[in-house]
Image (cartoon, rainbow, N blue to C red):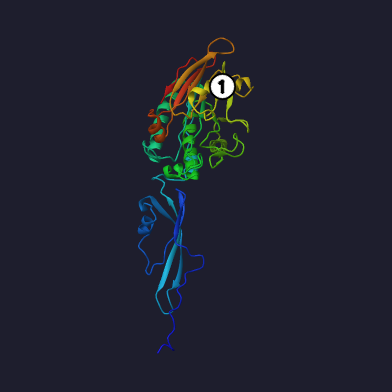
Amino acid sequence: MLENLEPAKKVTSPPNFRPGVEFDGTEGTATTPGYSSEPENFDEFLRDAGLNPDEIEVIPPVRTSRWQQKEGGGWLTSYRFIFRRKAAGVDLPLLMSEARRKVSKPVRGDRKEKALIVCPADLQVGKTGSRGGVPELIERVLKSYDRIEEQMKSGKYEHIYLLDMGDIIESTSNKADYNQLESNALSPMQQTDLAASLMLELIKRAVKYAPVTYGSIASNHCQNRFKGQQVGKPGLDDWGIVILQQMRRITVELGLDVTYLIPEPDDEGFAFRYGVNTIGVMHGHQVSRPDLIKRYWQQSSFGNQWSQACDLMLTAHFHHLRVEEFGQRFDGKGSKFWVQCPTSDTGSDWYRRSYGEDSSTGILTLELDKQQPFSGTVFKL
């Protein structure tokens, strides 16, 4: 009775076929199970994988693999595609489009012997938090720029210093955990592109009113890190300094009056002089809490470091505004000052939950008189 019967053909799938999803929080790869008919979309598949399809976009092309269930039977099709988290409505890439925008002609006129220091700090572009995401960050920063431009216009400064105080992007490897992947809305490449565009916008506004110096230092979110540990030269291998390099290329091409400051390759900060003032710039991640800045500055001075001659030290990292006097200048004509810059980020919610503290956002500016020591006045714009 069974002699002429044959078993059903073994169902085989394509070699190396394994349905599943791999996702790093920003980009991923998906391989679907076999479908007997073409799905309208992959929403249900993404939901089953624990993802919100409204936050995901599929990057073409979509590849397919087909196989027959059994001889003479129906065919199944599996789909393989790359996907990424949507960029929160931000039109990227931006940098080159910003570079092509016409630069307004300078409106400088008579200048005073004063300089304006502008300190964008801790933008952490790409991060989402209680203050929103990328669109809210852009809106907040541009509103600060509007207020700063009013100060640039009315101050009649002979020079403007734009100092990127660090953590300009959020990155994905600042710490050896996955929290940054979850809280990011942009990939590191998109973060860098948008951050560079924001800095270029600030340069183009400033250069209308005075010659500009743009500086950047090493910071914990921007350093080249693997599993939270620094890799390479701190004064070179840093996203903030990479952004500065792009600014230099663009401003040279546009013929803008901009010079640049970066640390030595093995340093994380630098110092510069304006008139009788010597200004130090570092991010602040060198210490675990703000009260240790004074000791670090003292020890680095004794260690003959770049900061030894400074009478004004600028830091960021701790996300709040603070101004303190630290002893006497070398010439006895005033005090040394430490100025801690406020943040522009979307919120450090883990810190607020852990310690109960939070502060309003803004970009710090201060004026320097060429003939007078700094006396402690700052603006939060």
From what the image shows, is residue 248 above or below residue 154? below
Question: Residue at 46% across / 28% down in the picture?
Answer: 318
Count how many numbered circles sit on residues in the image: 1
Left or right of 132? Residue 308 is: right
Picture coordinates of residue 193, whole percent (x, y): 49, 42
Of 349 and 249, nearer the camera is 349
Looking at this rendering, what residue extends furthest in the front direction?
1
Left or right of 100? Residue 349 is: left
Residue 87 visible somewhere in the drawing: yes
Picture coordinates of residue 21, whole percent (x, y): 44, 56
Name which quarter of the figure residue 269 lies in. Answer: top right
Question: Residue at 42% across / 86% down in the picture?
Answer: 5
Picture coordinates of residue 45, whole percent (x, y): 38, 59
Amino acid marked by disc 1? Trp
Q: Secondary structure at mark 1?
A: helix
Of 89 and 370, nearer the camera is 89
